[in-house]
Image (cartoon, rainbow, N blue to C red):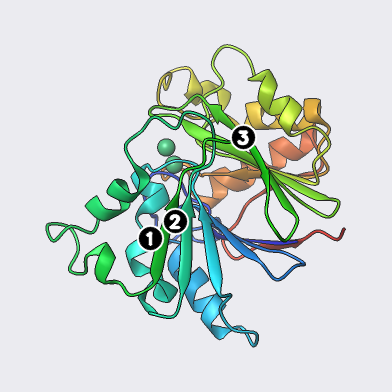
Amino acid sequence: MIITFYGTRGSTPMPEEGYLKSGGHTSSILLEFNSGDVVILDAGTGIRKIGQHLSARPEGVPENIFIGMSHTHWDHIQGFPFFGPAYNPRQKLTIAISGEDYDASDLETVFKTQMQSEFFPVPLDQMGAKITFWQPNLNRYTTSNGITIQSIKHNHPGNAYTYRIEELSTTIVYCTDIEHGESIDERIVELASGVDLLIHDAMYTNEQLKTRKGWGHSSWEQAVEVAERAEVQLLALFHHDPDHDDTFLDKIEEDARERFPASFLAREGMAIKILP
Ligand SMILES: [Zn+2]
Ligand SMILES: [Zn+2]
């Protein structure tokens, strides 16, 4: 499995000098599986470049692209209108939130709304691709190509989902936009147990978190705690606060590594290959 970070920022893009080493684009990650399948996690502004990358691959764009959503806050959907493959009439796209009792509005309505004429010139149904919205009321399923996806609904305003994705013996957990509360959500530790890579919300420091209760995010210290307790192989600190510049984030990475050496800061353009 190859995991490439195309958008690592939270909340709003940061296309400014001093921030670009960590990443200017909002959340979007590309997973390329051994089977040839492709999954995109979240459709922040980073997804535009994923579209360009897929179109430029020698093997071309996969017949069906699957976009898995942690949730539909704006920083996780705002790149979708700029996703090139969605304008190809021969392209199939599946946009999904999988998890039990998804109780926000209908996924299709959310995507349609951000492309209403008040916000964007091209409506969703005129993009061209055959887009399917999928909201299975399931917390575990396996695709026909043998990729197993498990999900947990976690605490975030409006709710969000953590995913554990497994192909062959390779496993990752994607856990962003999570507010653990007074103590770490034990279910996340359990789900992440022993995974090759944990991608975890690290928006704040513990100090900042004190004044940001209810905002829906974690500190890097909490991300490290989950990684330590779940004994993961690698921890990616993700969803960087737009006020945190490269210098600040480099320091977070250094501090995280002192506690958990297999930590790194997810930086835009970084690719991790995990062999089965
Ligand atoms: Zn977010
Ligand atoms: Zn959010």
Which residue type carries mark 1? Gly
Which part of the image, by quadrant, shows the N terminus? Answer: bottom right
Nearer mark to the viewer, of 1 and 3: 3
Q: Give above or below for 205 relative to 112.
A: above
Tags 1 and 3 in contact by the CB under 8 Å rule? no
Rendered location of residue 125, percent (x, y) = 27, 66
Q: Is mark 3 within 8 Å of ligand 2?
A: no
Q: Give above or below for 109 relative to 225.
A: below
Circle 1 is placed at which residue position? 79
Residue drawn 79% across and 29% down? 230
Residue 201 visible, this angle: no
On the picture, is 194 further left or further right than 163?
right
Which residue type carries mark 3? Asn
Of pointers 2 and 1, the one earlier in the residue sequence: 2
Q: Quadrant of residue 201?
A: top right
Of pointers 1 and 3, the one earlier in the residue sequence: 1
Rendered location of residue 168, percent (x, y) = 84, 55
Q: Give above or below for 57 relative to 257.
A: below
Q: Which mark is residue 139?
A: 3
Residue 149 visible, this angle: yes
Residue drawn 43% across and 18% down? 213
Circle 2 is placed at which residue position? 43
Q: Is mark 1 within 8 Å of ligand 1?
A: no
Between the residue at mark 2 and the residue at mark 1, the CA separation in whole angstroms equals 5 Å
Rendered location of residue 200, percent (x, y) = 62, 39
On the picture, is 177 further left or further right than 185?
left
Q: Residue furthest top?
A: 182
